[in-house]
Image (cartoon, coloured by chain):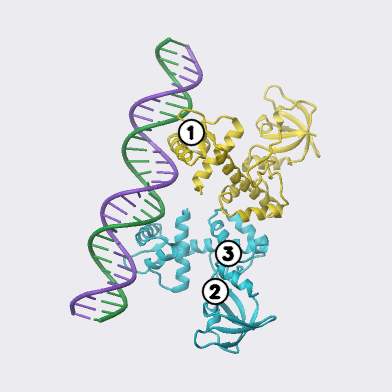
Chain colours: A yellow, B cyan, C green, D purple
Amino acid sequence: MNSLIEENYLKALFNLSNESGEVNVNELSKRLGIKMPTVTSMMKKLAKKKLVHYESYKPLRLTERGKKEASIIIRKHRLTEMFLVQNMGFGWEDVHEIAEQVEHIHAPEFFEKMDELLGYPKLDPHGSPIPDKNGKMEWKQYNKLSECKTGDIMKLAAVIDTTVEFLKFLNSRELRLGLKVKIKSIEPFDRTMIVSYGKRLSETLSYTVCERVLVEKV
Amino acid sequence: MNSLIEENYLKALFNLSNESGEVNVNELSKRLGIKMPTVTSMMKKLAKKKLVHYESYKPLRLTERGKKEASIIIRKHRLTEMFLVQNMGFGWEDVHEIAEQVEHIHAPEFFEKMDELLGYPKLDPHGSPIPDKNGKMEWKQYNKLSECKTGDIMKLAAVIDTTVEFLKFLNSRELRLGLKVKIKSIEPFDRTMIVSYGKRLSETLSYTVCERVLVEKV
DNA sequence: GTAATAAGTTAGAACTATCTAACAAATATA
DNA sequence: TATATTTGTTAGATAGTTCTAACTTATTAC
């Protein structure tokens, strides 16, 4: 059984690996807000437990067991987010912080029940895939909205950023997953996009925003 | 903000005070499965935080603040149990362990939402009162079934023991809260009761069982 | 290719929550 | 009351997670 603290290291390492390939002590340290020496010593501890491969000065890698345990925590997080939205009426902007705590509950039957009540969803409210009981998950290859070109019509598929501030911004523009967005023009100087969707015929989205939104072909 | 560990001491002290009046280090130590010296030092720590009144060799007492914080943890526990039963379809025997973990989640809006979805219940699935947001709760004065006499017709109101084993025993005899039970006779030697209820005209309940069931006049 | 900078490690300290061993106080018993 | 038992405290040790300071290795820039 891993402690809550170990679980947070595993999860952060798993997420960072998926985001940026190779992960080093410095990155993990920044992600967790924990100083590097502490991270080093935890990596040694997790290496002893066969959850990470650790060699001095080398990039950090989860073992297969480490990946599986991390996936299960992420499964619990995403099922919880989905449950909070679908079955309890929370907005997608309010669920991350709660799920961050609920994900550490050790009670498989609790999460199985959520899964069942939700009808075995494949995606969470932010469009991220929910790993199955064995920790397997399928990542669809989405593109960033910021990488699309003028004239493209794309469907919003997922968000990368799940902070309250970002999601409230999307709410304020009535932007939600599944929506079809047409790119009317792109400002070359700062890569701001002018887009249209639903009843909104001309909305301006900064590059910062477009970078955090994943889309797929309609 | 109190740690999970501090919360468990507060809750145990609160529950023991309600059960048996004066609480000493030894009792609290046994309840928590933690050795006495550890309990002593935690009491000193909680006294510094103005959550308990502590004097060497004197009984332990929660301060008003301590009582309030303990009540809020118990509120979260009982709302969770009720939610698991009413909104997620768990049996009353399966919810204690899960609630034991969920009660430590710091997210008032999560528990407010449960309360709302449940329609502001006053009692949990085991018949215990749910404290309000300010930590206030009303204890109805129930009697133990074991203290009733032959001929009494009583309604099952609450259970004292929430372990899986005990509740499964009650399930196996179709005993649930709200049920009317008539005491047909009491064996003087071991205080075993012969009772009737529903379609069951003659069931035998040991003193151990009757002691754990609270009842009220019909 | 050396110097400067960034990243990583080691050593040692602090804090929390736990324990055991030894002693002290309070309570029960004879 | 004197003794035995129970209860409670003090002191010191251990394990987990964190930190800072000092040092080492790797990478970047000139």
Q: Can I make out residue A202 in this image?
A: no
Q: Which residue is mark 3?
A: B78
Q: Which mark is residue B139?
A: 2
Between D29 and A75, the one nearer to me in the picture = A75
Amino acid under disc 1: Tyr
Q: CA distance from mark 2 to mark 1?
A: 56 Å
Q: Relative to residue A11, is residue C17 drawn left or right?
A: left
**Dot 1 and dot 3 within a common chain:** no
Between B204 and B91, the one nearer to me in the picture = B204
Residue depicted at x 36% and y 64%: B54
Q: Relative to residue B45, is residue A171 drawn left or right?
A: right
Report helix, strand or loop for mark 1.
Answer: loop
Query: How many numbered circles does the render carry?
Result: 3
Q: Is residue B190 above or below residue C16?
A: below
Q: Is residue B208 above or below residue A64?
A: below
Q: Which residue is mark 1?
A: A54
Amino acid under disc 2: Trp
Chain of the residue that carries numbered disc 2 in the rendered image:
B
Q: Residue B90 placed where, x, y %?
A: 65, 62
Q: Residue A33 placed where, x, y %?
A: 49, 38
Q: CA distance from mark 1 to mark 3?
A: 44 Å
Q: CA distance from mark 3 to mark 2?
A: 14 Å
